[in-house]
Image (tube, coloured by chain):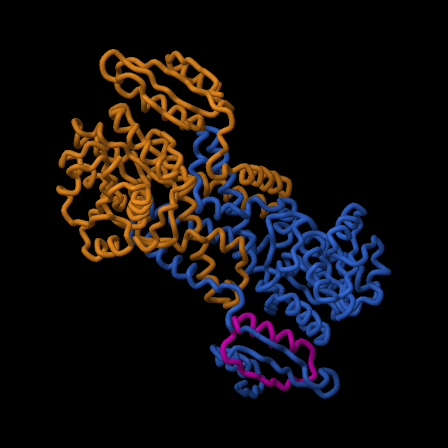
Chain colours: A blue, B orange
Amino acid sequence: MERVTVVGTGLIGGSVGAALRRRGVEVTGVDSDAHRRAEALEREVVDHATGELGRAVEGADLVVVAVPVGAVGPAVASVLDLGADAVTDVGSVKAPVVDAVERARPDLGARFVGGHPMAGSEQEGVAGADPDLFVGATWVLTPTGRTDPGVYSLVRSFVAGLGAEPVALTPGDHDALVAVVSHVPQLAATTLMDLASTRAVEHAALLRLAAGGFRDMTRIAAGDPAIWPDICVANRDAIVETLDAYLLALGRVRDSVAAGRSDELLHLLESARAARRSLPVGVEAAGPLVELRIPVADRPGVLAEVTTLAGRLGVNIADLEIAHSMEGTGGVVVLVAARRGVERFEDALAAAGYTVARSDLP
Amino acid sequence: MERVTVVGTGLIGGSVGAALRRRGVEVTGVDSDAHRRAEALEREVVDHATGELGRAVEGADLVVVAVPVGAVGPAVASVLDLGADAVTDVGSVKAPVVDAVERARPDLGARFVGGHPMAGSEQEGVAGADPDLFVGATWVLTPTGRTDPGVYSLVRSFVAGLGAEPVALTPGDHDALVAVVSHVPQLAATTLMDLASTRAVEHAALLRLAAGGFRDMTRIAAGDPAIWPDICVANRDAIVETLDAYLLALGRVRDSVAAGRSDELLHLLESARAARRSLPVGVEAAGPLVELRIPVADRPGVLAEVTTLAGRLGVNIADLEIAHSMEGTGGVVVLVAARRGVERFEDALAAAGYTVARSDLP
């Protein structure tokens, strides 16, 4: 990968640019705002900056669309119309964008793979750009039955090259999961901070009593507010469903407190602690590896099916290669994964009709 | 202060012991559990360890009761019965304990001042003890109309000596405020972690998507579960009231998301961010100081009234002294406070019938 174009030079676009430049990739930044273009150049997160999409797309090996969630769909369509070979984005919501692009561009949509790096910052704009932002972070990719396998491989390499861990999910699964681990936590923290701040009007000492736990819990409420209304619109159904589940669970806790049911509270606290303590930390040490060779028929969607199945089962794919052409009479998907727990993946592949050849790597 | 006895050698008791020993104070630890006594000695957080309360109370300048919330009341009463001159505690709930002690020991209760250091750790027991745990932390004290001014002064010096910032609140105010900044956040984080962990059963990738925001928000769910059921019982009313307010506010957010009312969401996010960004960090630089001299009549409760008024108004008292005897014909409370914003405090004192003489300190 020699030349990459980043559309949108904010926090994420700037971080992508900085990380790529450090690896010797030539980066062109596209931004409609002249001030932001100047800042991107000044902070050296891009080699070139332009307001013209057309020239920037031409000759790029990959176009990364890093504009606000509400603008991703139209931006990706424009980039595809300009003849881009491979396109990905970094938006926080995937299904509406992926569906819109594939519906609007049935012919060109194969060259787009949705993406979402699970990394951020309380800072805003290119001032917060950090070439190490993605190191060790999970980066979701959402290939579909229409995705071109070569484009998927390219985007996957790009993500792994930034130090992130690519995880394939269906767009719908992605949206349901981020509602739980990102969108609802953001709204819950924001609401808690607002409640405390309202109460602080009556009692000035309140916020002086806020110790580390409260600070930790409300930290995300300090982030850029402007991105969230669009996310709430784009992922409305999953957020409302998750908020309802959270309200129900918290209502039950309220009733346990009111009724003095200490055993119920203790049980909840213990199970939550066990879950919090076993939260995966960064990239897991892979341990012994296995290679899985999966002959695949010449039908679309095989790669998306195999990789999102791995994502769903929590199988960490250390490497992925498509041996032989996926066109013509078929090919072989070669996956390298952790040996530990791989049996479940093999079983699921078998159940889905695949034949899997496994060999332990030294 | 030469000799202090700490009853209960867990995380907080051990940290108090370690901090005092570093300052040359002789510390006796009392614990009913022989294993914990041995560990406290081994970790050098106490000079002596005993299972016998009587001998340990004798000769101590101050007794710090650091047992679980449910056991504080009876422990304080026992310590008072053994003739202690000054007693404080470190429990997370104050009104039930202070009320119980003052009701059970109308004669001796004056020697007890409730306390609560707003500092903790995800670690448990003396293994997590840290002499710097309280540096820069707010430490609430809850003097009442019955509290002996000399005992209050002593406990205040002890707290300031550990590097913490003493803030005086009424027991009821304390309990209402910690429900907002500690108890409800703990329950909200625990419930969120449990919800995510339940969803992770269906989708193994879920917790791999948990980035920094989710980790921050659920960090307190990793703490010791055992302390919380007692806290929920002791502070039930304030917790239920605050949870109800939180559920109501979060329900409104849910409705805003469902109806796509982006302007409401943006407004909430912006006001929460402003509040989070202005959260006081550690000890504020005091800036210019003033001295307030407040002649007080010979009636009980003056000190509690003056200091909790400062706490309520968020006035940071840098130093406090009682000039002349509070017994006899009256005395003078001498306060040193930040000049900035002190007018509100002066007005409130005047409204409460006090005459205040103010002089700016160089």
Which image quadrant for residue B296?
top left
In this rendering, would B271 be left or right of A205?
A: right
Residue visible at 60% across and 39% down in the picture: B270
Say whether residue A260 is visible: no
Please, which residue is most extreme toward the right here?
A: A55
Which stretch appears magenta? A286-315
Q: Reply above or below: B20 against A316.
A: above
Measured from the top left, where is residue B225 in percent x and y?
34, 53
Say whether residue A11 is visible: yes
Q: Is residue B246 highlighted in magenta?
A: no
Tell me how many marks there are: 0
Quarter of the rendering occupied by the N terminus of chain B: top left
Measured from the top left, where is residue B213 in percent x and y?
53, 53
Residue visible at 56% across and 52% down in the picture: A183
Residue visible at 82% across and 63% down in the picture: A57
Q: Reply above or below: A112 against B39.
A: below
In this rendering, would B256 be left or right of A211?
A: right
Residue visible at 54% across and 85% down in the picture: A361
Measured from the top left, where is residue A102 in percent x and y?
73, 65
Measured from the top left, where is residue A83 in percent x and y?
83, 66
Front-most of B166 and A187? Answer: B166
Please, which residue is most extreme toward the front here?
A: B24
In this rendering, would A349 be left or right of A326?
A: left
In this rendering, would B161 be left or right of A302?
A: left
Which image quadrant for residue B239?
top left
Q: Reply above or below: A121 against A281.
A: above
Front-most of A96 and B20? Answer: B20
Q: Is residue A299 highlighted in magenta?
A: yes
Q: Reply above or below: B117 against A108.
A: above
